[in-house]
Image (tube, rainbow, N blue to C red):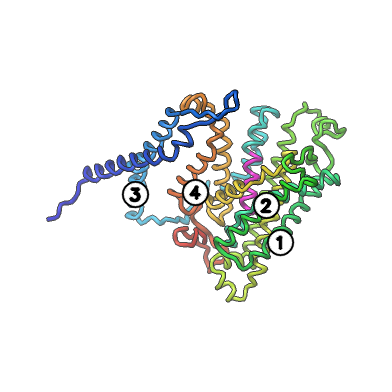
Amino acid sequence: MANIPSDNTAEQDVMARAVKEAIIAGFVSLGMFLLYVGIVTYQDINNQLVWGTRWGLLAIFVAVAAIGRFVVVGVIEPHLDRRKLAKSKAGILEISEEKNFFHKHFLKIALVFLLLYPMVAVYFRGAQGSLIFVDNFGIQILIYVMLAWGLNIVVGLAGLLDLGYVAFYAVGAYSYALLSSYFGLSFWVLLPLAGILAAFWGIILGFPVLRLRGDYLAIVTLAFGEIIRLVLLNWTDVTRGTFGISGIAKASVFGIWSFDVGAPNNFAKAFGLPMSSGYYKIFLFYVILLLCMLTAYVTIKLRRMPIGRAWEALREDEIACRSLGIDTVKTKLTAFATGAMFGGFAGSFFAARQGFVSPESFVFLESAVILAIVVLGGMGSLTGIAIAAVVMVGGTELLREMEFLKHVFGPDFTPELYRMLLFGLAMVIVMLFKPRGFVGSREPTAFLKKRKSVSGSFTKEGHG
């Protein structure tokens, strides 16, 4: 009779594997962080390069990696395995069609929360004190939501890997900055104009890449993004190069009220309110919220139209798409143009919000962050992408407020300097536990008789 391993033996094996992998993770993290964290360089008073060591901080990073791996292997993974086994024995499906109240009305709850968010912030912190919540955690996140939704049309729906999406963001921002500075046009005129100009550049990009797919397409779009940045950097007669364009005009409430301090129709003066820059940020919050809603509405409508079906067909198999008689040239161009248009909208809003633009704001890292948000949220899922933007962008902004980390890692620890390190760590964790993104199921736009959710594990790249 074969010996059946007992539960104690199985637990001992799990713990032994957890200890082994924790030790390996510790050595790997030691090799990774030795030069990045353990050694620091700086210039002394004689302008000489001096290097020092931070062994204590390095030890904390190694300990966190080792303990984290031990907890994942020894506690979290066995718990998830037991949970899946219990569900399979009970006959519970991975995708359940029964939804609770929160899942049914999630979008309505989120919209109500966003509408009330600035008012709640002002009520508790005042107009000036609410700036950090309305601007850093509100407007900043919504800008990335809009950018990610625009890129989602190109990557998530049409399946075209675009690594230069930040170029359209830059075109929108500089279109607003230059036309506002030289011609004095208002925000409400330049907003659609910036989107049209960005869409035009999207078509220009689309023509050279009509025959490219996969990695080749990614390389060409990456080059396009860098070309735009270098043009902005070196065309100093127009863009002022590294100095950027400052003094960009603020947006107004349809020309009725202005947010300029010296204007006779100043918003605060008109309503007898104390002077504060918080009112302008609150106004911008509702503007970007409206732009995000417009982006979501247009994306949903287009996805249900023939062009949206053509995008999805192109994403799944371009050869089969062409064999069905779909014009892949027009399909790619419309995807690039539509996605670029929303990038241009976001860029013009960014210029109005900042009042200053420079090429340093449109580097490749921005494209990588936007693409990461799309992938982490679940390509093709608007809700998942919005959640990913809140987690990733909001998480990195939250690091600026985590002063208590200095008590853990030492007084010299600056949390915001490590935001990209933690950003990458968060992406690894999400990909381990949710490889198809935050939203791993899809409801197809075309269905027979009854709409059914499809698990992301049964579909290509999580699409359904």
CA distance for labels 3 and 4: 25 Å
Query: Would you call the spot at circle 1 few (<14 residues within 10 Å), some (14-19), or many (20 or more)?
Result: some
- Comparing 35 with 76, the one in front is 35
Question: For residue 148: magenta?
Answer: yes
Which quadrant of the structure image shows residue 114?
top right
Query: Would you call the spot at circle 3 few (<14 residues within 10 Å), some (14-19), or many (20 or more)?
Result: few
| Rendered view: 117 above or below 444 | above
Disc 3, SS: helix
Provide the residue designation for mark 4: 100
Provide the residue designation for mark 3: 81
Q: Which residues are magenta?
A: 138-150
| Of callouts 2 and 3, the N-terminal one | 3
| Rendered view: 410 above or below 282 | above
Q: Residue at x 15, y 52 (%)?
A: 3
Q: Quadrant of the N terminus?
A: bottom left
- Dot 1 amino acid type: Ile
CA distance for labels 1 and 4: 47 Å
Disc 2, SS: helix
Disc 1, SS: helix
| Residue 167: assigned label | 2
- Dot 4 amino acid type: Asn
- Dot 3 amino acid type: Asp
- Comparing 228 with 384, the one in front is 228
Provide the residue designation for mark 1: 204
| Of callouts 1 and 4, the N-terminal one | 4
Horizontal and vertical percent for residue 88? 34, 55
Q: Are marks 1 and 3 in contact (CB under 8 Å)?
A: no
Closer to the eye: label 2 or 3: 2
CA distance for labels 2 and 3: 44 Å
| Rendered view: 409 above or below 292 | above
CA distance for labels 1 and 3: 50 Å
The answer to whether residue 452 is seen in the rendering is yes
